Image: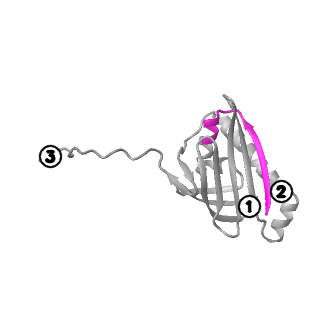
Amino acid sequence: MNSVEESIEVAVPLRTAYNQWTQFKTFPRFMSSVKEVEQLRPHLVRWVIGAGPVRREFTVEIVEQRPDSLVAWRCLDRWAGHRGEVSFRGLAPERTEVVLRMRFEPHGVKGRVLARAGATPRAVRAELGRFKQFIEGLGQECGAWRGVIHHGHVQPLEPDPPRSRVAGWPVG
């Protein structure tokens, strides 16, 4: 299993960086290898990635998510065996460090050659650079999901409100 860790500092508040990262559908707007993202459930995301005519589709499960802190995932498809996490740390009111850690199993001869050549760390670094340009260019997030996921289980954003004991209107 190979691993990569890259970090970047973005000139936006911690909450803004985190909120934008949770908007997976926007990833094709700034990540060159991401072609399509579909949020199937709060903890399941289908990705289509590729370069040129080659495309791969896979599903990831968000296993941990803590607002303003961490998003961790694992791939559910065998060929794309990887897992990773992205963490966020406020450095100043308008500065945030984004750290991406990923472990992956290269498949096939081409995958092993690219892994030995250091292609994955360069690609991750470049994609983080595009995230930086995107979020700093916007200056604010274009959405947010502030839920918590622990061990793959979505925890409600707020507790269910108590049910009213008063009969619904109109009565009679």
Residue lying farthest left?
172
Query: Which contiguous range is marked in magenta?
Result: 1-18
Residue lying farthest top?
93
Marks 1 and 2, the one that precedes in the sequence: 1
Q: Is residue 130 left or right of residue 67?
A: right
For the N terminus, the quadrant is bottom right
Identity, as a three-letter code, of the amino acid under mark 1: Gly
Mark closer to the observer (3, 2) = 3
User: Which type of secondary structure does the marked residue at label 2 adopt?
Assistant: helix
Report x, y in % for residue 52.
74, 61
Identity, as a three-letter code, of the amino acid under mark 3: Val
Identity, as a three-letter code, of the amino acid under mark 2: Ala
The structure residue drawn at horizontal position 61% and vertical position 36%, both measured from the top left corner, is 16
Which disc, if any, is residue 171?
A: 3
The image quadrant of residue 59 is bottom right
Q: Nearer the viewer, residue 167 or 130?
A: 167
Report x, y in % for residue 100.
73, 48
The structure residue drawn at horizontal position 83% and vertical position 56%, both measured from the top left corner, is 119
Report x, y in % for residue 124.
76, 51
Distance, label 1 to label 2, CA atoms, is: 17 Å
Which disc, if any, is residue 119?
A: 2
The structure residue drawn at horizontal position 59% and vertical position 49%, both measured from the top left corner, is 65
Q: Nearer the viewer, residue 109 or 94?
A: 94
Marks 1 and 3, the one that precedes in the sequence: 1
* Residue under pointer 1: 52
Marks 3 and 2, the one that precedes in the sequence: 2
User: Which type of secondary structure does the marked residue at label 1 adopt?
Assistant: loop
Q: Is residue 59 above or below residue 162?
A: below
User: Which type of secondary structure does the marked residue at label 3 adopt?
Assistant: loop
Which disc, if any, is residue 29?
A: none
